[in-house]
Amino acid sequence: MYNFWIGWTVIAYVFTIIPSYRNLATSIAIPPTRVWDIWRFPNETWVENIAVRANGQLLVTIIGRPELYQINPFEISPPILIYRFPSAVSVLGITETDPDVFAVVMGNWTLSSNPPGAYSAWTVDMRTFDNSPSSHRTTVKVTKITDIPEAKFLNGATFLSQTSGIVLIADSVAGLVWGLNTRTGEYAAVLKNALMNPVPTAPIQLGINGLHIRGDDDDDNHLYFTNSWQGIFVRVPLHLANGTAAGPYEVVTHLGICDDFSFDERGKAFIATDVGNTLLAVPTVGKEKGVVTILAGNANSTRWAGATATAFGRTEVDGDVLYVTTNGGIPAPIDGHIVHGGRVLAIRMRGLR
């Protein structure tokens, strides 16, 4: 799976960006006792994205194998393969659209290949799921919503609103956002801006990546998104009826290379940096809006190698726990050659926010 030429090219490009990024950021050291591994996959497993069920179970997607897994963060037990999707190579964004029902996007993207016309969106209904070994493989209802043949690289996904039934999906190569009606299968490009575009000279063509919606203090609903190789965190107000822009785009801060993220209840974003091998925190409101803090990791960190996405727990037990997925350093190995299996990490955030 790993392409060494791409890896060295990425590493070289990263070191042209990281110095300016580090000048923008402060750093704190999370005590090791606050961080633990939930699960580590075999070597060269790229864990791409994460969603948390209301019962606390974690759903993670895989690049390089068209698979969706459930991981139990409350006990040591192997992941459960929920579904292996047909006619795809990689499973990417995932977002909850109804209680315990998730939209998932997939296609044939890898580091070395991205054939056209290969992307689609599916619904995974976990409401009848049973964890018992004898039944869990037959109780998940999986349905294709639609193919999106015009898409160049479907990546992050977020749910717009119950009223609309629309999922917003980042197209990292086309530099736009698709609005997909999960009830009818209809879709259209709803957002397009230069701040979403990839960088032509970057070793991997990735523009807009993670995207999520939150209401700010002024009660406006904003879409926030990262642009991986422009290295920016951006927001734009939305019309909740259809996902189109309701105002101007605003660069919240400059990050360096970045991937997917999540918010806490105070509006602070926790952003994975992929080949940056770090976890960042960025307030989106208040006096410290846009101030970047490095919470964990560094350029040589094997534990945080290739951090890809974050999500908070949803139960009384883990509401203050931030879960982080990693790809183990596949796109940019540590020291040019060290690649680990992707992980799901947990951080106890109480007192750190």
Image (tube, rainbow, N blue to C red):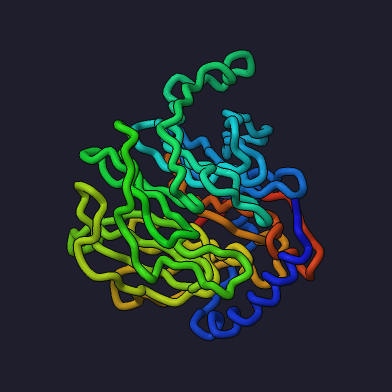
Residue at far right of view:
337
Q: Residue at x 20, y 60 (%)?
A: 220
The reply, left or right, for residue 133 in relation to residue 349 is right
The answer to whether 14 is drawn above or below residue 333 in the figure is: below
Q: Is residue 294 visible?
A: no
Quadrant where the image shows the C terminus:
bottom left
The reply, left or right, for residue 42 in relation to residue 353 is right
Percent position of residue 53, x then y: 45, 36
Q: How many marks?
A: 0
Percent position of residue 237, x then y: 24, 62
The answer to whether 69 is drawn above or below residue 252 in the figure is: above
Q: Residue at x 64, y 60 (%)?
A: 306
The quarter holding residue 100 reads: top left
Percent position of residue 216, x then y: 25, 61
Residue at far top of view:
134
Q: Residue at x 51, y 44 (%)?
A: 117
The quarter holding residue 9 reads: bottom right
Q: Is residue 57 visible?
A: yes
Frontmost residue, 273 versus 312: 273
The answer to whether 191 is drawn above or below residue 8 in the figure is: above
Percent position of residue 17, x then y: 58, 80
